[in-house]
Image (cartoon, helix red, strand yellow):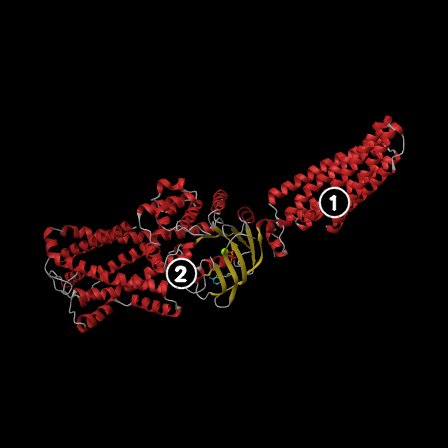
Amino acid sequence: MDGKTKIKAENLNLYYDGNKQALKDINLDLKEKEVTALIGPSGCGKSTFLKTINRMNDLIPNCKIEGKVIFDEKDIYGDNIDIINLRKKIGMVFQKPNPFKMSIYDNIAYGPRIHGIKKKSTLDEIVEVSLRNSYIWDEVKDRLKTNALSLSGGQQQRLCIARALAVDPEVVLMDEPTSALDPISTLKIEDLISKLKKDYTIIIVTHNMQQGARISDKTAFFLNGEVIEYDLTENIFMNPQNPKTEEYITGRFG
Amino acid sequence: MNRETFDLALNEVNQDIVELGSKTIQVLEKTKVALTNLDENLAKQIYSDDDYIDAKEIEISDKCISIIIKEQPIARDLRFLITALKISSDFERICDHSAQITKLTRKLLKHNAGILPDSIDEMFTITLDMVKRIVKSYATNDVEIAMGVYDDDDQLDKAYKSMVKWIKGKIENNVDKLDEYLDYLFISKYFERIGDRTNSIAKWIIYKEKGNIRHYYNVKD
Amino acid sequence: MNTKIKDGILLALVYLAAIITIASLFGILGYILWNGLGALSFNFFIDLAPSIVTTMIVIGVSILFAVPVGIFAAIYLNEYSKNRKIVELINFAIDSLAGIPSILYGLFGLVFFVITLNFNWSILSGSLTLAIMILPVIIRVTQESLKMVPISFREGSFALGASKVMTLGKIVIPSASRGIITAVILSIGRIVGETAAVFLTVGTVNKMPSGVFSSGRTLSVHLYLLVKEAIGPDAFNEAFGTATLLIIIILVIVLFTQLIFRGRK
Ligand SMILES: Nc1ncnc2c1ncn2[C@@H]1O[C@H](COP(=O)(O)OP(=O)(O)OP(=O)(O)O)[C@@H](O)[C@H]1O
Ligand SMILES: [Mg+2]
C-alpha cells in the first residue's frame, strides 16, 4: 500500500446521543488520488465515517468524537482548524441529488462566491470548467440560466458533483451517489469518477458491489461500526481474508 | 438476489464437475482394460464416452456463463465458477487424450500383436493415480491432495523422459520398426499431457480454495 | 357497489362544500361591488383620501415593525435555539397570542402606547399595536416554511464551506420566501380588516395625517362609523363605496407584494 497518505483515521470512535457508539476504533489510511469504496450493511456506520471526514457531524447535536482524523498531516478535530476551509478542501456529494433552487449557473457559482470570488469572468470560467469536468457541460451550456431543479436526476447529480468541484477541493466524499439513478446515469457517474481520480482523492459509499469493484482501488468493509477488512479492491472481491467480508459481499450475510 | 437459487445452481455445477471427474477416471480405466485385453467393444465405448464428455463440458460451460450473467458472482463464488470452467475443459482434454491413446495402441497391437513395454504400463499407473486423487481433491475441497498431485507431475515427467530414452535406443537398433516406436513416443506424450492437465486441475483447485495461484506457483518455480 | 355509493356521497359533499365556499365568497364580493361601484367617483376619492392614506401608512408601519421581528424570531426558534423546552414554551405563548380577541390588543395598545408611552392616539400607537397582533401569524407561518426547506439544501451549502448565516441568507430564507409572502399577505388582510384595535389606538379623526404621530381614521373604522352612526342619507351607499375601495386596495396590495417577491427570485 504505497502512495501518499491523504486522510488517516486513528483510533476513531464516534457516539451519537452521548452513548450510542456508531464508530468503533477505526484505523484507516486513505491514499492520495485513489478511489476508496466503503461497503457494508445498512446502519454499519459508512455515512457516519464519511461525515467525520468533513466534520458534517458537527451539525448533529450530542455527537461525540474521540480519536483523530488526520488530513494533510493535521488533526481536523484538533485546535485551530478552519472548518470552512476544511470543507472547501473536502467536498461532498450526497445520496439524493440536492441542487439548490436556483439557476444552474448560480448553483455552481455558489461555492466560489461564498469563498469570496466576485469577478464575473472568473466565475464564468469556474462554472464552465466545473461543468466540463463533470461531463455535463454539453447538456446544459445553452440553459445555464434555467432552474437546476428542471434537470433529470442523473444530470442533477452530475451538477452536484460539478458544484463540489467548483470550490477546487482535494478530496471528494460521495455517499451512495448513484443509488437514486437509472443504469445509464449511473454508468455516466462511474465514468466520471474514474476520470476524476487522477486529480482527486475520492471516498465513495456504495451498496452496489459491482460498482465498488468497477471504480475503486481500495475497499473497506464496515460492520457494526468497525472496519473488518481494508485491502485492494481486487483482493476484497476475489479473495477476502475475513469470512464476514466474504459472507457480506457474496450476499450470504446474516 | 435470491441466494437459494444461486446456491442450488452452484451446487449443480459442482456435482456436474464431480461426475465429469468420475467419468474421466472410468474412461482411463476402460482404456487400460481395453488395451490389456484388446477389447474391441470397450474401445468403441471409450469413443462414445468421449463424445458424452465433450457434450458435458459444453453443458457445464453454459451453466457457468448463465450463472455469471445472472448473479454476477464475486469472491469464492466467482473463483468456483472460473475453476469449474477451467477444469471441465481439462477433464475433457484428458478424455480426448485417452481416446487418442486407445486409437494408437489398438493400431500398434493389431500390427505386431506384441506386448506393451512396461514403462507404458508404469506411466498409465501414475496417471490414473493422479487423476483419481485430483477428483477426490475436488470432491472434498482438499487442497493438500491437490498440492501432492501437483508435485507428482515430476514423476510422470521423469517416466516420460526415460521412455524417450528407451525409444531412442530401440530405434537405433530397429530402424525398420520406426513407425511402431513413433507410436510409443506419441502414446507416452499423451500420458505426459494428461499429467499436465491434471496438474492444471490441481492448480485451479488450489486457486479456488486459496484465492491465489501465483502464490503457490512462485514457491514452485 | 356499496363503496361506490359511499364514494358518490363523499364526492357530493366535497362539491357542496366547494360550491358553498365559492358562492358565498363571490356572493359577498358581487353584492358589495354591485352596490358600491356606483358610489365610486372622483369626489368620493377626494373625500376618502385621508382614510386611504391613513390605512396605507398603518399597513406600511405595522409591516415594517412586524415582518423583520417575526422573521428573525422564527429563524431563532427554528435554526438557533438549542433548548427544546424553551422553544415549546415560546411556541405555546405565540399560539395563545394568536387566539386573543383583537379588542384586547386594542386595550393593551391604549394603555401602553397611547397613555403610558404617551404616543397619544396616533398611527404609531396603532401600528405598534397591530404589529404585535400580527406577529404570531408571521412567526408561525415563517417557522412552518423554514421547516419545509429540505435539510439536503442546508447540507449541500454547509458541505461547500458556507457558514450558517450564509446558508440561511442565501439558501434557506429564499427557499422559504413563498411562505413568508403568504404570512405578509395574511397580515395585511388582518390589518386592513381590523377595526376595534385601531379604533382604540389610532382614533377616529377624519383628517389627512401629517406623520406617524398624527391621529387618523382607517377605512375600516370609517366603514364602521358610517354603518353604526348612519350619518347622512347616503350613508349606506357611501359604506358600500368604502367597502369596494377596501377590497380593491387589498387586491392591489396582494398583487403588488407577490410581484415584489417574485421579482426578487
Ligand atoms: N443523527 C443520528 N443520531 C443518532 N443516531 C444516528 C444518527 N445518524 C446515524 N445514526 C445511527 O448510527 C448508525 C450508523 O448509521 P449510518 O448512517 O452511518 O449507517 P450507514 O452505514 O451509512 O447505513 P446506510 O447504508 O443505511 O446508509 C446507525 O445505527 C444509525 O441509526
Ligand atoms: Mg448511509
Against B45, residue C65 (above or below) is below
Residue B27 in the image, given as x and y percentages of width and height: 80, 38
- Residue B201 lies left or right of residue B185; in this view the side is left
Discs 1 and 2 carry the same chain letter: no
What residue is disc 2 on?
A82
Secondary structure beneath dot 1 equals helix
For label 2, being within 8 Å of ligand 1 is answered no
What residue is disc 1 on?
B18
> In the displayed image of the protein, which residue is found farthest to the top?
B176
- Residue A248 lies left or right of residue A163; in this view the side is right
- Residue A69 lies left or right of residue B40; in this view the side is left
Answer with the quarter of the image where residue C195 lies.
Answer: bottom left
At label 1, the amino acid type is: Val
Chain bearing tag 1 is: B
- Res C201 seen here: yes
Query: Which residue sits at x=24%, y=64%?
Result: C131
Q: Residues within 10 Å of mark 1 (few under 14, many from 20)?
A: some
At label 2, the amino acid type is: Asp
In this view, the residue in front, A37 or B61, is A37
Against A24, residue C12 (above or below) is above
- Residue A9 lies left or right of residue B163; in this view the side is left
